[in-house]
Image: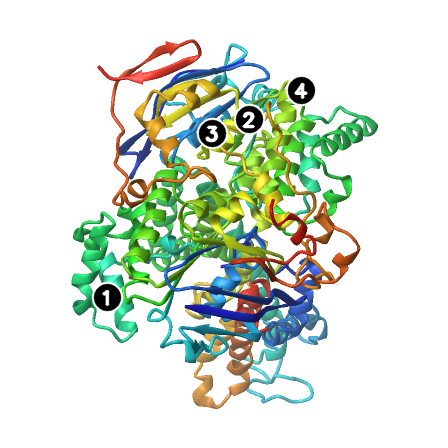
């Protein structure tokens, strides 16, 4: 079970402090797969990495993260060490292209486990069992990364990340670089891990809302470092309350929609700079529903059970 | 206008080209004026290679490609330049497509120098602002470095570059995949508008929804071989080839959910590619590969 | 070495440009110190001979004198003015360094660029050429050349050094060119119908300009060092004086045993200082050009 309250993360750059996450609060229940969606620069990757403190350049500015009622020391790199891989685990973006090309898979895994103080040999049977569930024969461990396809590498990384049954798994763009058929299998693997109890809760970070519609129990939409909306998947897809979510869904071509028949609208403009974010609602400049009150930042509040939105006009449109 | 006639491509590797790999086999199709044709396939299907062959960035091993009846492999020097005034390309990674140490405006100065040197200043500026307007950008944007702009803006600049030349065919290789959802649709709509004005587009992609949105005809490639092709609504409306069907099944939808069985069908993706066979006409404007 | 990357979405890139490079250049200790030392000797080479009151090779001074008001660096065993020899020697060292370095750089760039950009059979042929030149026993060849040419000039020496020291530069440039050629902007340049020459020198080379500068600096320093070594063992030019030759004479005439330190210390120190300062500048330049190496 994960509870995040008012998390603030900045990046230091030559030009100043980039406020990548500016006060984010939400929770993920046990057994819940939460999708985290948004466009580039919204902060979703930062949030994923912050929960496990993967990047040194990140500056923890404030807020609290509780995992299973224990406070996670995300401000302290060393203090996070015992939690990483055991309680919180991540499948990083580009993981499958980060495999050492000169090492056989089995040897690489053994080395990684040794570095964490675990004996590779004792975990081998479980490793092979889990690989088999995903359709990978044990001889995969004797191969070099270049001999495996993208989908296979992604599966290996996923099994590795969940080997110690972490309480929380963060999957960062795990389907982005794959073909549609592999995407479907990897998405299914995520659900399977949750169903078998290898992982208690999961945060799936992606820009692909369609995949989330298939596997996630709830979806959280981020915009410019803040939360825009969080709701059960069906609600987000069928009756979203935040204008950004609606516009985002409205710009997705599905098989069946053609340009001649229906010209899909995009969203005009660009997200604001996070170096000096605007006052008030960050979506104000691009929002068709913006009005006077929007210069005051709307709080992220619950408008219906399990449905939270940060928009002054949310109540009026809650029923779609 | 463009004819790809029984084209195959064999890559050689190893010292002095010992090993051979056949990446395209007997690909044959046509592109007419004002038509958008999507080349759809997964990685390894050869779709990018076909695009590169049309752009003369890779040579044709067997068969030939003709443009207005002329074999493009014979073009050299001035005739090649003339070809590039008619046919241009835009690639997947907008940041890689610009030389990072120069401002983006240099791309247009180069175009003017290489192709339109005989235009006087006024005529050039009119063309330039016309092209930039068409893609929704201003002349002021030219004074920036690539890293100061977004991926979507850079892709639109690349389209503007092609428009300045008044091309007839654009090869767009996965140009949307690195853009955000809201920017994607803008670039796609732009392509749709250009098509209405008479531009032909070869749209190389792995995303069936995008292909469906914008194309008149679809060509499905599997391991370098065309398995199905025809009008968009026919191929996607009533797919005949098992590979096309499996592709359509694997696309996630917002509203139709995969069943529990479908989702739990784990394991590796089966390799269903088959050799041989030939294309037959299933109905008008809809060809399928069958194996005897 | 550095390759430029696209901007990350989370942190907007700081405005690059010449100003940033100069800003870091002036603050980099290694670069500044190396440049100052190098400049001192360069000025000595350019203006030194104007101050030399005596000819470097004429025996018109009392032999074996330590440094004094008349003879600032003393005299050799044969009565030659050491200071005069020193500044003329500096000049010839720089000339050899420049000529040899430029020759090697030009050959290295041509071979490296064309092999890296064209690939295929051209790459295979140029690679073979590079490997052949690399394994030629230059010392043995030089002995043979020395035997044939009884009178050798600075130019010959510079040419020899230039023709034999380019392989590593070619390899390095080839590797960098390979990686840049795979970038889409090169593909775009081909879609402009640009010629190979134009693409290499208009698009690829400017992108590796820092790399090329550093390669040239290393070739320059290497040429000076090689020339000094060749001169020291007597295979250098026969018609002029150089720092290496000074070392040669002083050692052959037992200057160390005779306690004539003013004969070999200046040239030895100069060679060390010049080559050393170049290498130190190089390390400093790497830090200036590569943002990841800078301490923030």
Residue receiving disc 3: B52
Secondary structure at badge 1 equals helix
Question: Could you tell me which chain the residue with mark 2 belongs to?
Answer: A
Q: Residue at x 19, y 57 (%)?
A: A128
Question: Could you tell me which chain the residue with mark 3 belongs to?
Answer: B
Q: Are marks 4 and 1 on the same chain?
A: no
Asked whether the viewer can see residue A229, the reply is yes
Label 1 and label 3: CA atoms lie apart by 42 Å
Q: Are marks 1 and 2 on the same chain?
A: yes
Label 1 and label 2: CA atoms lie apart by 51 Å
Q: Quadrant of residue C88?
A: bottom right
Q: Residue A164, percent across and down?
A: 28, 67
Asked whether the viewer can see residue C201, the reply is no
Task: State the residue in front, B166 or C31.
Answer: B166
Residue lying furthest right: B122
Query: Residue B197 bears which disc, if any?
Result: 4
Q: Quadrant of the N terminus of chain B?
A: top right
């Amino acid at each position: 079970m994960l509870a995040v309250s008012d998390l603030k993360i900045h990046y230091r750059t030559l030009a100043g402090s980039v406020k990548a996450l500016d006060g984010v609060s939400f929770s993920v229940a046990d057994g819940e797969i939460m999708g985290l969606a948004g466009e580039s620069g919204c902060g979703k990757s930062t949030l994923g990495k912050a929960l496990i403190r993967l990047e040194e350049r990140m500056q923890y500015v404030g807020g609290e993260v509780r995992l299973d009622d224990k406070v996670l020391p995300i401000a302290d790199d060393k203090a996070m060490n015992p939690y990483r891989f055991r309680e919180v685990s991540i499948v990083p973006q580009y993981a499958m292209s980060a495999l050492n090309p000169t090492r056989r898979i089995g040897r690489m895994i053994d080395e990684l486990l040794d570095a964490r103080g675990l004996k590779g040999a004792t975990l081998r049977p479980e490793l092979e069992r889990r690989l088999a569930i995903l359709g990978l024969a044990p001889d995969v461990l004797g191969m070099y990364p270049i001999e495996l396809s993208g989908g296979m590498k992604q599966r290996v990384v996923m099994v590795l990340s969940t080997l110690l049954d972490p309480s929380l798994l963060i999957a960062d763009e795990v389907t982005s670089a794959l073909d549609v058929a592999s995407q479907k299998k990897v998405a299914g693997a995520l659900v399977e891990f949750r169903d078998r109890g290898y992982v208690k809760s999961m945060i799936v970070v992606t820009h692909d809302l369609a995949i989330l519609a298939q596997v996630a129990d709830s979806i959280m939409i981020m915009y410019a470092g803040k939360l825009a909306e969080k709701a059960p998947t069906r609600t987000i897809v069928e009756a979203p309350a935040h204008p950004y979510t609606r516009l985002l869904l409205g710009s997705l071509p599905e098989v069946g929609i053609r340009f001649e028949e229906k010209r899909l609208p995009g969203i005009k403009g660009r997200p604001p700079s996070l170096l000096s974010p605007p006052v008030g609602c960050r979506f104000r400049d691009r929002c068709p529903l913006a009005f006077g009150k929007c210069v005051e930042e709307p709080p992220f509040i619950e408008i219906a059970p399990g449905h939270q939105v940060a928009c002054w006009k949310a109540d009026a449109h809650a029923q779609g | 206008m463009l004819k790809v006639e029984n084209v195959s491509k064999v890559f050689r590797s190893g010292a002095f080209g010992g090993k051979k790999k056949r990446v395209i086999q007997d690909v044959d199709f046509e592109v007419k004026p004002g038509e958008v044709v999507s080349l759809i396939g997964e990685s390894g299907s050869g779709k990018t290679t076909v695009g590169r062959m049309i752009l003369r960035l890779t040579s044709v091993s067997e068969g030939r490609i003709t443009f207005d009846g002329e074999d493009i492999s014979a073009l050299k020097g001035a005739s090649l330049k003339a070809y590039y005034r008619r046919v241009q390309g835009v690639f997947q990674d907008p940041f890689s497509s610009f030389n990072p140490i120069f401002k983006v405006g240099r791309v247009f100065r180069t175009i003017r120098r290489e192709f339109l040197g005989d235009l006087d200043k006024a005529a050039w500026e009119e063309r330039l602002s016309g092209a930039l307007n068409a893609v929704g950008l201003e002349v002021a944007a030219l004074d920036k470095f690539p890293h100061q702009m977004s991926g979507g803006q850079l892709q639109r600049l690349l389209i503007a570059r092609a428009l300045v030349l008044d091309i007839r065919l654009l090869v767009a290789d996965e140009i949307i995949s690195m853009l955000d959802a809201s920017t994607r649709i803008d670039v796609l709509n732009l392509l749709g508008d250009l098509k209405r004005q008479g531009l032909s587009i070869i749209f190389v992609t792995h995303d069936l929804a995008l292909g469906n949105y914008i194309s008149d005809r679809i060509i499905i490639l599997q391991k370098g071989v065309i398995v199905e092709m025809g009008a968009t609504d026919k191929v996607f409306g009533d797919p005949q080839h098992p590979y096309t069907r499996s592709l359509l099944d694997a696309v996630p939808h917002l509203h139709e959910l995969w069943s529990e069985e479908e989702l739990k069908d784990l394991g590796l993706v089966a390799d269903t590619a088959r050799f041989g066979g030939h294309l037959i006409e299933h109905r008008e404007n809809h060809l399928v590969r069958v194996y005897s | 070495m550095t390759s430029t990357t696209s901007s990350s979405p989370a942190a907007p890139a700081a405005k690059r440009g010449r100003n940033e490079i100069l800003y870091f250049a002036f603050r980099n200790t290694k670069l500044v110190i190396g440049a100052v030392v190098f400049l001192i000797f360069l000025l000595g080479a350019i203006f030194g001979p104007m101050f030399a009151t005596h000819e470097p090779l004429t025996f018109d001074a009392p032999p074996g004198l330590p440094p004094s008001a008349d003879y600032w660096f003393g005299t050799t065993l044969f009565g030659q003015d050491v200071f005069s020899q020193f500044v003329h020697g500096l000049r010839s060292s720089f000339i050899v360094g420049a000529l040899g370095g430029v020759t090697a750089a030009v050959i290295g760039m041509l071979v490296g660029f064309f092999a890296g950009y064209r690939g295929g059979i051209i790459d295979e042929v140029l690679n073979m050429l590079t490997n052949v030149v690399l394994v030629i026993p230059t010392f043995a060849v030089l002995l043979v050349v020395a035997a044939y040419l009884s009178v050798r000039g600075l130019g010959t020496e510079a040419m020899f050094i230039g023709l034999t020291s380019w392989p590593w530069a070619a390899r390095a440039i080839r590797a960098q060119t390979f990686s840049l050629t795979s970038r889409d902007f090169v593909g775009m340049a081909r879609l402009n119908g640009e010629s190979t020459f134009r693409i290499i020198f208009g698009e690829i080379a400017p992108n590796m300009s820092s790399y090329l500068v550093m390669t040239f600096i290393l070739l320059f320093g290497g040429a000076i060092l090689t020339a000094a070594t060749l001169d020291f063992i007597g295979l250098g030019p026969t018609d002029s004086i150089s720092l290496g030759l000074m070392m040669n004479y002083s050692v052959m005439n037992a200057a160390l045993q005779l306690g004539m330190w003013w004969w070999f210390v200046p040239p030895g120190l100069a060679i060390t200082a010049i080559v050393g300062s170049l290498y130190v500048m190089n390390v400093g330049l790497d830090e200036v050009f590569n943002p990841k190496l800078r301490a923030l």
